[in-house]
Amino acid sequence: MTSIKGVISYIFQRRYLFHLLVWVMYALLMLIDMQGYIRKRGWLFIFNPFLISFLLMIVLVYGNTLLLIPRFLERKKYLPYAIGILLLMTLNTLARSRSQLHFDAVVWPNDPMNIEDYFKWNVFYSLWFIVISSMLYYAQRWAEQREQVRNIQITQLQTELKYLRAQLNPHFLFNGLNTIYGTIDLRNSQARNMVVQFSDLLRYNLYEAETDQVELQQEVAYLQNYVALQRARSDANLSIQLQTAVSNGNLAIAPLLFVAFVENAFKYTSRDDRQTNNVRITLSETAGKLIFTCTNSYDTAPGQSGIGLANVRRRLELLYPGRHTLDISRQEGIYSVTLTLHL
């Protein structure tokens, strides 16, 4: 029983296979219905009446399922749908009746019939196939929706598993950092501070930055920790400055908007031992207007299409449409970024 259900579900979910099977079954029924033609005139004779009947049924079925149902019935426009069905059935009935009258007259010339003799049966025939095609349409839609729900459930389970695995790794990392911190000599304050700063950066990335918005003061603290960690690992010939002036630290802002620019500044800053290389970062906020600048000396400038920069550009377009300006320039060995936000 399970295998039969699986086969039926598979057929319904494969649209073209499903339609092919339906039309093969209809063709077999047509051949059975035309046995009188075959006995009287042979197989070649049935080609034209078979083709005409088949094409008329295709127009009837797909006129209903591809045009009338999606355009009217699913939009709850019942009157236009009813009018469309009546018109479609009337045309189909007339065409089928005339076709049958013509070919029956050829096969049985001594038994003449009137078009009215075919009309009643063909009205029922058209109505029957309208009902059947509608039922099959919604059965297939139901199968497709079930498949979509199943795929969504699978995706949710995979996401949940990934989330659970992600929860294990941070705990391991934080425990490891605590162990490292505890083994560092108390006199080595620089190393201990670096571990604390790195732990704070990691915690912010994993937990606090997962929300849609954070307080501006949290983002400032993150930048300060990041710059402090970079300062501790940089050479003496790299001058690093960070200046912040925030009047309202409680303002809500999307997290991690600035770090990609700061990461690039440290990544691409010049390394010439014969000169003082520099990274300058400022962040100021007044009356909800935030101005962030980041400049660095460089030998090789970063590209404009990096993943980090592209990600920030896209986030700004989505989160602050019409409320931000981003200017990036290169001039005389200085790479400069200025981002203005209206919060």
Image (tube, grey):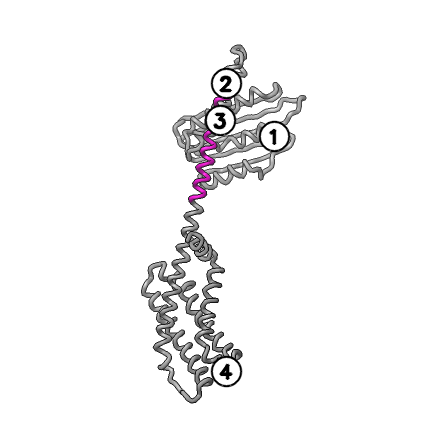
Specify the farthest residue to the bottom.
110
Amino acid carrying label 2: it is Thr
Q: Residue furthest right?
A: 274
C-alpha gap between disc 4 and disc 3: 85 Å
| Label 3 neighbour load within 10 Å: few <14, some 14-19, many 20+ | some
Q: Which residues are magenta?
A: 153-178
Q: Is residue 147 magenta?
A: no
Eye-nearest disc, 2 or 3: 2
User: Which badge, 2 or 4, comes first in the chain's sequence?
Assistant: 4
* First in residue order: circle 1 vs circle 3: 3
Residue beneath disc 3 = 202
Q: Which residue is mark 4?
A: 41
The residue identified by callout 1 is 268
- Residue 232, image x, y percentages: 56, 19
Task: Residue under label 2, please give it.
Answer: 179
| Label 1 vs label 3, nearer the camera | 3
Where, by quadrant of the figure, is residue 215 drawn? top left
Q: Amino acid at mark 4?
A: Arg
Mark with earlier residue (1, 4) = 4
**Quick one: which residue is furthest to the front in this view?**
1
Could you say whether the residue bearing mark 2 is in a helix, strand or loop? helix
Q: Nearer the viewer, mark 4 or mark 3?
A: 4
Q: Are marks 2 and 3 in contact (CB under 8 Å)?
A: no
